[in-house]
Structure formats: structure tokens, C-alpha cells
Amino acid sequence: MKSLFFLLNRCLVTEFYQQSAGFFMVILLLAFGFFSSTEHIALAQYAFRLPLVMGIYWVLWALYGAKTLQFVGQTLRQPEYQILFHLRLVPFRQRIGLLLGVQFSLLLPAVLYAVFMVVKAGIPLKATGGLALIPVFLIGLTVAGAAQTEYWLRHPNARQNRQRFRFWFNASYPTPYVLFFGRYLLRHQPVALGLTKLASALLVYGVCHLYPTDDYDGRLLAIGVLLSVAIHAGLVYQFYQFEAGQLLLLRNLPIPLAKRFIGYALVLALLWLPELGLLLRYRPVGVSIWFLAELCWFAWGLLLLIYSQLLIRPLTLEQLVGKAFWGFVLGVFIVMFRVDIGLLGLLAWGLGYAIFRRWFWRAEWVGS
Amino acid sequence: MLTIRQFRKSYQGVPALHVEALSLPPGIHWLRGANGSGKTTFFRSVAGMLPCEGEIWLDDRWEIHRDPVEYRLRVNYAEAEPAYPDFLTARDLIRFVGKTKQSPSGQGDELAERFGLTQFWQTPFGTYSSGMRKKTSLVLALLGRPRLVMLDEPLNALDIAATQVLYQCIRALHTQGVGFLLSSHQDFRFDELPIGQHFVVENQTLRPA
């Protein structure tokens, strides 16, 4: 039993946390970069008082639970992990115990945050209803996860039926290169993608609404765009990792550098497309379309500049996020000096292309 | 066919492979070496997938650093353990690579048919068996009009029928002047092919056997 749990722990739990390091990094930056512990406690108190806020926590935990399950399902489908289907030979009670243990280990970050909420807010407020419901919800999430894994173990071919639509879609619409990364994100990193886009979209939406409230000028929008791009550093890192790990073949293809650069520009443009839509939809009165075009040009160039950093030398996610953060600080200073945004965009594009041109063939492409 | 001068490959400053000078004549050659000896590093470097120092000339005309596009148009490579995005289908990959390698019309479809890939045309790569993965990478390596094709452990995971198809493809291309560099651990595996020279990768270098 112990050795089986050790095996499952290695295959599913440890692997999940290793592969989700980037995701947890983004969560840590979002959750603890913007809020102090006092604010977390205030939010928790709010949740114990208002069912709606508690509901938001539950939705987030459920989304996290879905991410863990997606990982388990994906792992079981991989040929090298087929050995896990031998679990069917373990007696039912022991197997369920193992699966509950695995699911609990996967949900541990949510459980720990719930414990923090209970200790710091629930108990002091004596919110008995909330105190009872949180463990019930998390136990339910654990049981549901274990039950789904048990179902997959019992029905190893069940997914084939559900894949018919995907097969039909694949047959009808071959994937062009610029959509490779988007499909990868949707399939393997949906939560990181969702959270990044949510944070970035809220930021763009926020600055568009803040703009008319005072005597602001275009610099506010430019700083918003700068921060939005910096938030995307994690996804740009994922893009590099995706190609280095799964598309090393690209380097053998006879594609001219300029065409490669255009390909990367299109992939990154797709990534920032929702923010462009938001800027157009909530364009503040008095801001010209031309200025919005300059902002997008600027954002696009910055994304390329971030990507090009990974070609100079292999960086960890933390190093790239650190560079993006300091780049943001520097960018704020430059923007505050009223430097033309179109010119800054040109600089970012020019620098990005110069680095790309010099380093693309020399880059080692270290994938995880 | 392939001329190498002062080739050096290091990983983060640690030397991995050094070839002072080597000339591979046209033909089918066999590259041998123990696990971890540097065969894959050599293949990947010659394929332009890893940065390296020195000169690698194809037909004394295209140099890997000087003519990166023309060189890559003519040098193809199949990995020993191919890894591609699990959501892409064989068709996605063959069309994408075929287009960049300027594959003649219908070549990808014909190769896929011969290797028995078409029945998995619409299926994502992540669901493939190791044999199907290998066949996909071999088809990708045969696309276009290569001058040199490098196949790393090409027979691993292949069934007998696919092995015969591969031999036929190699022989047919060989008669058209295409060079091959093959690797395998087992001595008996390429007995159906007219192997030219044998090379060994050991002690961080490559030399004729």
C-alpha cells in the first residue's frame, strides 16, 4: 500500500507540482503581489459574511480541482503511464483510499488556503455555517476527483467516444502554425491562460474607466499596457518552453529568419488580441484610434522583446518575470517623460528583431 | 556529401563533441556509439537543431551557418524518440513540414499511405503508439527533396512491414543520389541496405570505424 502510494505520488502529485510551477508562480504573483496578508484576511472575513464572496472562493477552488483532474486524465492517456491502469487489480477499498490520498495531495494548496481562512477569519468571527460548509465542500471536491479517476481506471477507452468530435474537427480544419501555441495553452495550461487574461483584461478595463475620472492623459493607458504586457511574461515563457520541448523540429526547417520573426509576431499578437478588443470597446472619449494603434504596436513590440530575452541565454520563469518587472519599472519612467509611444514601440520592435536576428541560431533552446 | 571542419559542441561550457575534420562521401553510412556517446547531439547539430561551432558543408556548396535556409532545405532528420505536440495530427505535421521543405504535391499523402499512417490521419499525436510516432517522424524526414537524410535509430518500434517500406524508400532515394546517415545499436539491423562507411562516436569525437 505504501509503495503504491509512493508510485502514485511520483507519477501524479510530484509531476503535477513540477509541471505547474509556472502556474503557481503566476498565482503567487497575482495573489500575494497585489494583496498583503491583512487584505487576504479582510477578504476571508468578507467571504464568511457574504455567501456570494464565499461562492467565488468555491468557484476558484473548483476550477483548481478541475485543473488537477485534467492533469490526472492527461497523464493516464499517455502511453508511458499505462502502468497506472494496473491499479484496477488493487482491492476496491484500498484503491479508493489511494485515490483519495492522491486527490487530497493535489488539492493541498486550496486546503491550506481554506485552513488560513478558517483560522484567521472563520473562528474569530464564529461563523459556524461557513466553518461547517468549507470542509464539506473540500471533502466533496476530493471525493469527486477520486471518483472521476476511478471512472477513468474502470473505463480506459471511454474517452475515445468523446474524441469523435475532435477527430472530425481535426479532419476538417488542419491547424496552421500560428495556432499551435494557442491550442497548446487551451489544452495544457487553461488555468494559467485564464488567470493571465483575466488579470490583464481587468487592468485594461480598469485604466479605460479610470481615464475619464480625472485629468489623465495617454500615459495612464500606456502604463496600463506596460503592466498588461509584463503580466504576460509567464505565457511568453510557456511559448518558448513549448517550442523548445515539443517543436525542436522547427529549427531544422528552412524558414528565413524574417519569416520566423513574423510567425512569432503573429503568435504573440493573437495572445494580446483580447486586450486590443477591450481597448477598442472601452476607448475613453478623447483618445484617438491612432493612439490606440500606437499602444497596440507598443504592446506587440514589448512581447517580442520579452521573447527575445529567452534567446540570449536560457532563463528560468522567475528570471524572466524578474526581467519583465524591472522592464516595467523602467518603462514607467520613460513613459512619464512623455516619450512618444509610437517611437517606443518602434524601439521595442527594432531591439526585439535585432536580438532575434543575432541570437536565434545561437540559442540553445533549453526545454523543460 | 558532408564535410565537417573544426566542429565543436558544448553544453553550458562543458565539451560534448569535437570533430576536427571529417568527410562523408555520398552513400548510406552507419553511425554507431554507446548510449550517451553523442550520436543524437551530432545528428541534431548537423540538422541545425542545436547551435555548434565550426563548419558543416553540404556538397561543398551550402554551409550551415552561412546558408541556414538553403542548407536546411536539403538536410532532414528523424529523431530516435520523436516528440511533437500531442494535439497535432500526423496530417497537421506532414502538411506543415512538407510546405516548408517544398515537398512535391502529393508526396506527404503517398508516404503516409505507404507507412500506413492515413488511418490515423485525424488522430492527435498524443494517442499514437510508439510505432506510429516513429512512422510519423520517418515520413517527416523523407519530405521534400533532401540531399542528406539522418535517421536516428530508425528501426526502433517499427513493425516488419514498415521496416520493409523504409528500406524501399532508402534504396529508392539512394539511387537518386540522396545520402543517408543511420544509427543503430545492433550490428545486424541494416543488412538489407548497401552500407558504405561505418563511423563510431566515442570519447567525445566521431571517427571512421
Image (tube, rainbow, N blue to C red):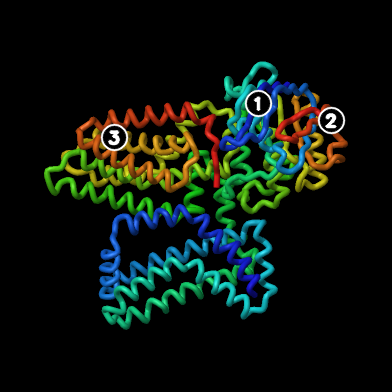
Q: As drawn, which residue projects farthest toward the left?
A: A215
Instruction: Give the side of residue B181 with respect to residue A137, left or right.
Output: right
Do marks 2 and 1 both belong to one polypeptide chain?
Answer: yes
The numbered mark 2 sits on a residue in which chain? B
Q: What residue type is labelled 1?
A: Phe
Q: How far apart are marks 2 and 3 (CA)?
A: 60 Å
Q: As drawn, which residue projects farthest toward the top?
A: B61
Quadrant for residue B35, please give it: top right
Label number found at residue B7? 1
Label number found at residue A293? 3
Q: How far apart are marks 3 and 1 (CA)?
A: 47 Å
- Estimate how packed mark 1 is, as few (under 14), some (14 to 19) or many (20 or more) residues with alpha carbons within 10 Å: many
Residue B99 appears in the rendering:
no
Q: Which of marks 3 and 1 is in front?
A: 1
- Estimate how packed mark 3 is, as few (under 14), some (14 to 19) or many (20 or more) residues with alpha carbons within 10 Å: some
Give yes or no for contact between labels 2 and 3 (Cβ–Cβ under 8 Å). Answer: no
Q: Residue at x 83, y 42 (%)?
A: B186
Residue B21 appears in the rendering:
yes
Q: Is residue B67 above or below residue A279?
A: above
Query: Is the N terminus of chain B in the top left, top right, bottom left or bottom right quadrant?
Result: top right
Q: Distance between the residues labelled 2 and 1?
A: 24 Å
Q: Where is residue B100 in the image (x, y as percent from the top left)?
A: 58, 30
Q: Residue at x 46, y 72 (%)?
A: A141
Please give the residue where the numbered disc 2 appears in the rendered image: B195
The numbered mark 1 sits on a residue in which chain? B
Q: Position of residue B167 (x, y in %)?
A: 81, 36
Q: Which amino acid does label 2 sit on?
A: Ile
Determine the secondary structure under disc 3: helix
Do marks 3 and 1 both belong to one polypeptide chain?
Answer: no
Quadrant for residue A233, please give it: top left
